[in-house]
Image (tube, grey):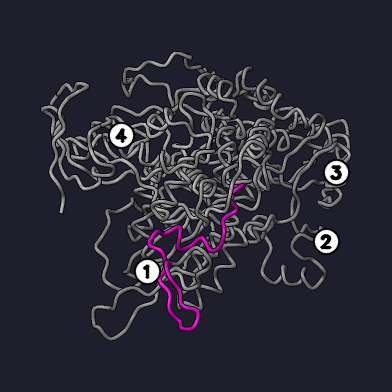
Amino acid sequence: MDVNHLLSYSEVYNQETVQFLEQEFSRLKDECFLDHAGTTLYSKTQIKKASENLLSSTYANPHSVGVASNFTHDLIEQVRYRILDHFYVSSEEYSIIFTSGATAALKIVAETFRFKSAESPDKKIEKNGNFVYLQDNHTSVLGMRNLVSQNGASITCLTHEKAFDIFHKSKVAEKQTSVAGSNSLFVYSAQCNFSGLKYPLEWIKAVQNGKLDSIVGGNGSWYTLLDGSAFVGTNELDLSLYKPDFVCLSFYKMFGYPTGLGALLVKNSSANVLEKVYYGGGTVNVALSSESFHVKRESLHQRFEDGTLPFLSIIALEYGFETISSIPLTEISKHVFSLARHLHHSLLTLHHNNGNPVAKLYSDTDYEDSKMQGGIVTFNILRANADYVGYMEVLSMAALYNIQLRTGCFCNPGACQRHLALSNRTILENYEAGYVCGGSKDLIGGQPTGCVRISFGYMSSVNDVETVLRMVRKCFLNKPEVIKVPTWWIKERERLGIKYKREKYIERMPSITVSILYPSEENTNGKMCRGKVCGHKVEGIDCGAEVSEWLSLSLGRPNLRLIRQTKKKIVEDKRKNEKELSFVSQAQYLLINEASIFWLFDKVPNDSECRRETMLPRFRGNMVVSGCAPFEETKWKHVRIGNCDFQVEGLCTRCQMVCIDQTTGEKTVEPLRTLAEEFHGKLRFGIYLSRPTSEDVILKIGDEVNYTLGD
């Protein structure tokens, strides 16, 4: 068997991607950053765009009311849609609750999950549910136990072996009708932050279908909480296929910046099991200070997001998603796996001159399947006499090579205990001897209390692996080195065969030309975008980077995107008997009364920069009528223009757009100031019209206008 071939690195990225990453992370120079499970790195363009945005924009507290506040609020809502889009779901199925990180998201579920459900069938007692978690969970999951026990939940810890034994016993059954009783919660990680093992996402459905009933003796409803923190930065999480009830994550682990921001994704159909007690600013419709009375907001995220959100950080998320979306996550997953495989296999086969191994590796896979193994390698270094090298010594040597890595147990005491074969008694004895989480007591009685972890990110390179291997060879290996391939590994390799090959990613740039015809859904290359305009949900296709650059340069504003409405959306609206709307409209048509325009102008102060001839274009009506009294149109119910009938849908709420001179682009305070003054803050002007039929009709200038009055 060709050992060199077994140990060779399999390239995943094409040269264009490699060059892109070299430019984006040129600041690294000789630094070797290998703690991406702790936090990944932000890109140059990401920070540049975020900074340019802050320098060219004014953002206000979204809880306030005003132009800047409304703009901030709308951008936050657009980011929510962007997050959901990244995970292949819509706001109809999942909601986003912003938190300070994954830990805060876990705490929310622990504090609010209702383990007591409906009354039991005998109407005499209420049943409490179960809290089940894996031994190999983050410390933040372990911290949930005290809270859920106060809520009456029974607590069960599943060992690694027990969990796989339970879930692999039989196929997932169809959902059974639950007997009214308890609500139970199962928590596990999509990827272990200790070993990089990817736990099967199929467990989600299995649990929801009652797979764990047999171990806890329950028959109520089951919910799943997926810890996606160590997974989503380098793997694709498709929530349209796997539907956990709750998902927690931290954004800095996805794209480095901003820190202190995470999210709890909640499946809307499961939101009713979260009962929030505390309320803070912005989460209530009304509250009395002298009496214990309040009414929480209807929207799920508004009820749970206490106080003012870190809105500047949330707005900056868009540039992180842009960066990570520049390379398909399927390629990123293969890339970090390929790096981890190369390092794992190299350490596995590297031996001292006496034949003893140089590393003790801790893993749950053989690093031959990217679907099971992530970009993490965990190990301890061994001397030629088989003694352990303390991880603090490894950390010191790594610093000489500008290597940033992680040591200890990585806030995963269960996985650490399992892989190092430490009993509960040994851990407590180590604590008495001075070991604490995050401490420097690396060896006690010659045995390790933790490990060394190398974790890769999407911008990591094979040079990083070679730097680690060079450090190991130079600092810890007794030469000449010996390469030994384990017998079990050779047999396994022969069974599996060599199955990795290089794949090429081809990026297609859209043309600057934008057709006015609707593109067919299967032929468009644009990215589907969702957001809000004037408080209304919109959906469309991004016209591309070149168009974005052209718009940004032309208008002098950074990061502008051109989004076009899709034909598919319009067809769906018609099927639902909903009115066909464009992005910027709340109705199909806007009618303006010329007399109302001139009445308003006469109220504008004489020293205003707002000129009479610019008034009508400012309000951008589809139709303008004359010969009526000012604001007579506000009383109309039905309108007939020529031979075309319209239904009046209400008054148009105006925004700062009417302050833009449509001929010069200059901005003035009028006529919005006068409109607000004259109508006591009710900024309404013009009426919305809709057509009851889709029959083609031609309207002409000079057509007669008839109307009927409302009640």
Which residue matches tag 2?
441
Task: Give the residues in magenta.
Answer: 285-313
- Under tag 1, what secondary structure? strand
Q: Who is closer to the viewer here, 415 or 104? A: 104
Q: Amino acid at mark 1?
A: Asn
The answer to whether mark 4 and mark 2 are in CB contact below 8 A is no
Labels 4 and 2: the sequence-earlier one = 2
> Rounded to the nearest whole Å, what is the CA distance between mark 3 and mark 2?
22 Å
Say which of marks 4 and 2 sits in front.
Answer: 4
Seen at 33% across and 37% down, the residue is: 585
The answer to whether mark 4 and mark 3 are in CB contact below 8 A is no
Question: Left or right: where does residue 438 sit relative to residue 704?
Answer: right
Seen at 82% across and 68% down, the residue is: 434
Question: Left or right: where does residue 269 sit relative to residue 409?
Answer: left
The quadrant holding residue 4 is top right
Q: Residue furthest left?
A: 643
Q: Amino acid at mark 4?
A: Glu
Q: Who is closer to the viewer here, 634 or 71? A: 634
- Under tag 4, what secondary structure? helix
Q: Is residue 298 magenta?
A: yes
> Rounded to the nearest whole Å, what is the CA distance between mark 4 and mark 2?
81 Å
The disc at residue 384 is 3
- Under tag 2, what secondary structure? loop
Q: Amino acid at mark 3?
A: Ala
Which quarter of the rendering shows the C terminus?
bottom left
> Rounded to the nearest whole Å, what is the CA distance between mark 4 and mark 3?
92 Å
> Rounded to the nearest whole Å, what is the CA distance between mark 2 and mark 1?
42 Å
The answer to whether mark 1 and mark 3 are in CB contact below 8 A is no
Q: Amino acid at mark 2?
A: Lys
Residue neighbourhood size for the residue with mark 3, other residues' Cα within 10 Å, grouped as few (<14), some (14–19), many (≥20): some
Question: Left or right: where does residue 456 sit relative to residue 403?
Answer: left
